[in-house]
């Protein structure tokens, strides 16, 4: 058993050394700009190879803090305006860190590549349904092969983040550190968003391009603030609540600056969830919330109130839809129209759909899944959502640690918010929302696995102690 360990250790030293020598030779024969790009690319890969946990931290801090590059013909930047593939710095970081982690796992031969978790099969089922739908779309001419391939990689790269996190994290201390790192990232993103408010424009995350994506930032903030809410609501989760209260205030201001109605609706669902939890403990809280809601037009920023009322108060324009006697604005009308349009496209290929990018662009998650993956993909998607919810509930019920109970409670509240957010956005395929979502899903699953393994380890320790006592007793008897 010693030889493999020595060989693995030698390879772990040799591989970074070879990479360093190769990089030095390339830098010596290339232009300074290319050399800088190579160094920036090699750094996270070497760091992740030497320490997968350090690579995970790089990913956490690169979420929403990395620049973007739009590739392919699209009608705009970001996630809602066209079919261009938006590549970001964290995409490349994830690729480099992932390759380094796979290489280290293969060399060290430690652990399984895919640790068995409650979400493995639902993830594989949904991915398989999307791949099948896209292949059928390519065969029928609805999907361009290159476009479909890259969008599949782009949309489902966060599943890889889930599997990597579950395998890299090994202790409760590491889980706490990753959570605090993600909260620190949220704080920095919120400060950046607040700095944009004086410009009078809707705020967005860093490096979002000229138009930005306020709806994406809003969904991210709703989820992260739900995590903060869960920690604040759970007794004993944290000893110092002031940093979380500050983050809640800063993040709340940034959320209002997005002027995203889908995000406001999602935040409302989170608040209703909180009220449902505290109703039995103190009925006074729901009453105070009702008073705050009724007086909201007097204390909320004018821009927020105007944005919400704009849904029904927009001046009459072509393209507006009437719901009875109520006329809704053009943006909401387009979303309602896309839901109706999705039913027409669904009828053309009801079983497996048109494939990823095979249908029209729809800025709503549920009809998009129906159009692109049909009944098979929609059922697989619902199974995945149910598995995530069930795993969260199981973690909250079984894990005794107050900190993780707070994180899990926040995750469930945020999950409920994102389900509503997805009505008006492609929430579950927006990488900047799904990266933190699946990061926290992995942390909860990992904590649940460690908790379930404790009884077995304790039983093994007790059995060993019993054996040792028996051996000692025989020794005394023979003496």
Image (cartoon, grey):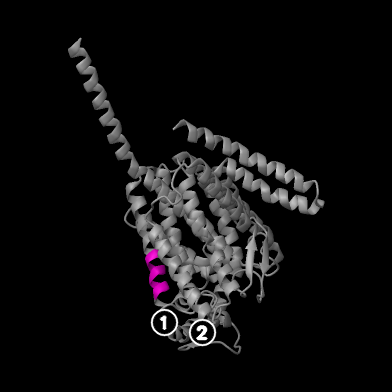
Q: Which residues are magenta?
A: 376-384
Residue corresponding to mark 1? 350
Is residue 142 among what the camera can see?
yes
- Which callout, 1 or 2, points at the residue further toward the start of the chain? 2
Secondary structure type for disc 1: loop
Q: Residue furthest left?
A: 477
Q: Residues within 10 Å of mark 2 (few under 14, many from 20)?
A: some
Q: Residue at x 54, y 69 (%)?
A: 297
* Main secondary structure along the magenta-highlighted residues: helix
Secondary structure type for disc 2: helix
Front position in the image: 35 or 65: 35
Front position in the image: 256 or 319: 319
Name the side, left or right, on which 341 lies relative to 188.
left
Is residue 204 among what the camera can see?
no
Would residue 406 be counted in the magenta stretch? no
Front position in the image: 277 or 16: 16
Q: CA distance from mark 1 to mark 2?
A: 19 Å
Q: Is residue 264 above or below residue 95?
A: below
Q: Is residue 152 above or below residue 47?
A: below
Q: What is the x, y in percent for residue 15?
A: 62, 41
Q: What is the x, y in percent for residue 25?
A: 76, 45
Which image quarter holds the N terminus?
A: top left
Residue corresponding to mark 2? 337
Q: Is residue 338 above or below residue 184?
A: below
Q: Are marks 1 and 2 in contact (CB under 8 Å)?
A: no
Q: Residue at x 77, y 47 (%)?
A: 27
């Amino acid at each position: 058993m010693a030889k493999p360990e020595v060989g693995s250790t030698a390879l772990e030293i040799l591989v970074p050394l070879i990479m360093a020598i190769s990089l030095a030779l390339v830098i010596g024969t290339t232009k300074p700009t290319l050399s800088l790009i190579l160094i920036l690319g090699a750094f996270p890969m070497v760091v992740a190879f030497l320490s997968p946990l350090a690579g995970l931290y790089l990913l956490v801090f690169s979420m929403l803090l990395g620049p973007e590059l739009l590739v392919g013909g699209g009608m705009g930047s970001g996630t809602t305006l066209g079919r261009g593939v938006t590549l970001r710095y964290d995409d490349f970081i994830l690729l480099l860190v992932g390759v380094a982690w796979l290489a280290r796992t293969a060399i060290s031969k430690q652990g399984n590549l895919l640790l068995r978790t409650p979400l493995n099969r639902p993830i594989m089922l949904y991915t398989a349904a999307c791949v099948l739908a896209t292949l059928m779309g390519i065969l029928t001419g609805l999907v361009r092969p290159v476009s479909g391939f890259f969008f599949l990689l782009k949309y489902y790269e966060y599943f890889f983040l889930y599997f990597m996190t579950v395998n890299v994290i090994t202790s409760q201390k590491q889980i706490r550190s990753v959570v605090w790192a993600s909260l620190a990232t949220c704080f920095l993103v919120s400060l950046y968003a607040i700095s944009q408010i004086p410009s009078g424009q809707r705020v967005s995350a860093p490096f979002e391009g000229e138009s930005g994506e306020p709806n994406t930032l809003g969904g991210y903030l709703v989820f992260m603030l739900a995590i903060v809410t869960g920690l604040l609501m759970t007794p004993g989760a944290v000893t110092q609540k002031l940093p979380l209260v500050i983050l809640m205030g800063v993040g709340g201001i940034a959320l209002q600056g997005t002027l995203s109605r889908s995000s406001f609706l999602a935040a409302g669902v989170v608040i209703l969830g909180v009220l449902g939890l505290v109703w039995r403990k103190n009925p006074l809280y729901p009453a105070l919330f009702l008073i705050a809601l009724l007086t909201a037009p007097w204390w909320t920023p004018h821009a927020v109130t105007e944005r919400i009322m704009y849904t029904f108060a927009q001046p009459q324009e072509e393209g507006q839809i009437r719901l009875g006697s109520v006329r809704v604005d053009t943006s909401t009308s387009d979303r309602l129209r896309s839901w109706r349009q999705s039913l027409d496209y669904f009828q053309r290929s009801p079983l497996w759909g048109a494939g990823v990018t095979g249908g029209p662009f729809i800025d709503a998650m549920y009809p998009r899944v129906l159009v692109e993956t049909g009944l098979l993909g929609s059922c697989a998607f619902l199974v995945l959502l149910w598995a995530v919810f069930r795993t969260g509930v199981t973690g909250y019920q079984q894990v005794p640690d107050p900190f993780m109970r707070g994180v899990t409670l926040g995750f469930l509240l945020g999950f409920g918010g994102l389900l509503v957010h997805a009505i008006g956005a492609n929430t579950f395929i927006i990488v900047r929302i799904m990266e933190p979502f699946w990061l926290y899903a992995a942390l909860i699953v990992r904590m649940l696995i460690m908790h379930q393994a404790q009884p077995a380890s304790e039983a093994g320790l007790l059995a060993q102690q019993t054996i040792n006592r028996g051996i000692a007793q025989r020794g005394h008897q023979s003496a």
